Image: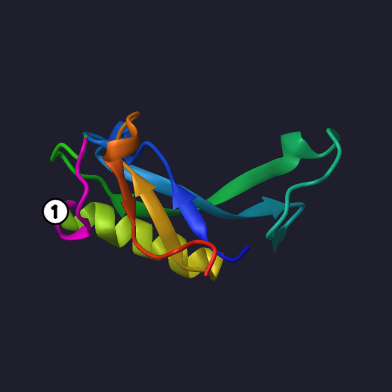
Amino acid sequence: MSSLCVTKLDVLDGMDKLKMCIAYEYRGKQTEYAPLGAQGWDECEPVYLEFPGWSENTHGVTAWDRLPPAARAYLRALEELAGCPLSIVSTGPDRDHTMVLRDPFA
């Protein structure tokens, strides 16, 4: 991946906490990937990072600095874990609810 686009950030508004799956516990070992086939899924336990949620309304926000600090922290953690920059964030269904933080094709 060279860039991330997060859409509909506003659907996370009002959640007490957010979980981000970073690995799986499978047969006593931690792995980044779940089994490829259906067999073994019942033995997988997700490993989560937890983040505080936010109560502020993000619907229609179009400036990074107007997002709640917890939303920015969540997005920065996603960026760091993915190992690539966040380029676009949308906060609603309309095109004008989109923040272009950097050119995703640059």
Residue visible at 70% across and 43% down?
44
Secondary structure at badge 1 equals helix
Query: Which amino acid type is marked by label 1?
Result: Arg
Residue visible at 32% across and 30% down?
94
Indicate the quadrant containing the N terminus: top left, top right, bottom left or bottom right: bottom right
Q: Is 25 placed left or right of 12 in the picture?
A: right
Q: Residue furthest top?
A: 93
Reading the image, the residue beneath label 1 is: 66
Residue visible at 74% across and 40% down?
43
Is residue 84 placed above or below 27 in the rendered structure?
A: below
Q: Is 2 placed left or right of 79 in the picture?
A: right
Figure colour scheme: rainbow
Q: Is 71 placed left or right of 101 in the picture?
A: left
Q: Nearer the viewer, residue 43 or 80?
A: 80
- Where is residue 93, by image quadrant? top left
- Where is residue 95, by image quadrant? top left
Marker count (numbered): 1
The percent position of residue 13, horizontal first and vertical second, equals 24, 36
- Magenta span: chief secondary structure: loop
Q: Is residue 43 magenta?
A: no
Q: Nearer the viewer, residue 95 or 66?
A: 95
Residue visible at 68% across and 59% down?
32
The percent position of residue 25, horizontal first and vertical second, equals 66, 53
Q: Residues within 10 Å of mark 1 (few under 14, many from 20)?
A: few
Residues drawn in magenta: 60-67
The percent position of residue 47, horizontal first and vertical second, equals 55, 53
Is residue 106 placed above or below 41 in the rendered structure?
A: below
The percent position of residue 65, horizontal first and vertical second, equals 16, 60
